[in-house]
Amino acid sequence: MLQQLKPDEDSNANRSSVSEFGEDSFAVGTWEQKEITTRDGHMKIQAQVFFASIDQRSERAAGESACTALVAVIADWLQNNHNLMPVKSQFDSLIRDGSLEWRNLCEHDIYRERFPDKHFDLETVLQAKVRDLCVVPEKSFIGFFHPDAMEGENFEFLHGAMSFDNIWDEISRSESSINGEAPVFIVSWNDHFFILKVEADAYYIIDTLGERLHEGCNQAYILKFDTNTTIYNLPSTSQSSEEKSGGEQRTFSEESKDGILVTLPEDSPEKEKEEEVVSRGKSRAKYIKNFLAAIPIRELQADMKKGLTMSTPLHHRLQIEFHYTQLQEPASTSPPAIAVTSTAQTVDVAISEVAA
């Protein structure tokens, strides 16, 4: 069995041999130290990233809207390979396998009738037995991002509801299960699914859509949070992106959505300015809040101040779900299947996927 790739094993990054993963060459891959900055330029993170060769939108995967099937396939692999992370060729293979499972589901009339846009929810994928995987409701969490200003009747549903910070505190307090195995969560937020693996010395976010990391990225990735991870507040700049000369410097003014991130160029003038360290360490996987959610939440607040009509319900834009996964027990000993539903204290919202 292939052992977990360590960040310092760069010498094995391009090893080739006869492949069992559907490709002509076999690659181990390597961890890369990256600096990632939010589109608005407010914050930056320094962390290690591991890339696949492809993502779900690649021609070799053909899984445009397959992220629900993909997280089920990857979670199943992690549950069957405790204390390991996939190497590059395995990561590629998982992306192709999950995309194939999604395309197979698209061939069934019953699923096409229920999901004409082919964006299947998590419950459907699990019930279709894409993998022998299940969700444990009593170890799962459903809550909401709480904007800084929650005044008005529009935010009344948030009072008493579990917040993202509450959820993260619960996850941090129970970093390992009773048998010592690292918990694997399927995370659903903003119409997308990804994986969170919680180990004693590191947290991992696994995402099959490259543009969730930075604009223009076409590779799935694993983002690692450990003691070396650092988040910075960046100083505001008085010079707007429109005033900067074109061609010689990249800026953060390009259109994107849903908190998509951009990589700060090495020659960026922002690097020359003083940066404030916000925090260090693995708990900085609150990156989900500070990076993924910060811009959409600010945009939401701006829309509400303008009195704009929202096409997506407010609670759906703020809701985040952490589904604790485990392998399905044999039918002879397993209890009746439990559907993936919201708890009584949260808004009952169907888990659905919309093309990113």
Image: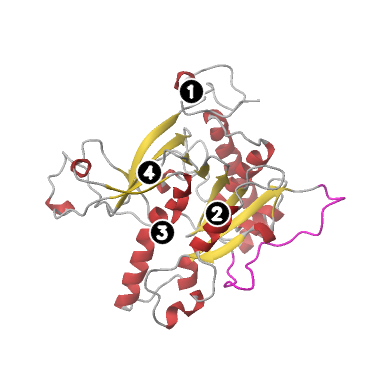
Which residue is depicted at the point 57% across and 45% down? 197
Q: Position of residue 210 (x, y in %)?
A: 43, 43
Q: Is residue 11 magenta?
A: no
Residue at the disc numbered 3: 293
Mark 3 lies on a secondary structure that is helix
Q: Earlier in the sequence, mark 4 or mark 1?
A: 1
Within 10 Å of the Cα at label 2, are there few (<14), some (14-19), or many (20+) other Cα atoms? many
Mark 1 and mark 2 in contact? Answer it, CB < 8 Å.
no
Decide which of 274, 246 is in the foreground and name it. 274
**Structural distance between the alpha carbons of marks 3 and 4:** 18 Å
Residue at the disc numbered 4: 230
Tell me the quarter of the image containing the C terminus: bottom left
Q: Is residue 332 magenta?
A: yes
Discs 1/3, front: 1
Within 10 Å of the Cα at label 4, are there few (<14), some (14-19), or many (20+) other Cα atoms? some
Residue at the disc numbered 1: 9
Q: Is residue 66 visible?
A: no
Q: Position of residue 189 (x, y in %)?
A: 50, 59
Amino acid at circle 3: Ala
Q: Which residues are magenta?
A: 330-350
**Structural distance between the alpha carbons of marks 2 and 3:** 13 Å
**Structural distance between the alpha carbons of marks 4 and 1:** 22 Å
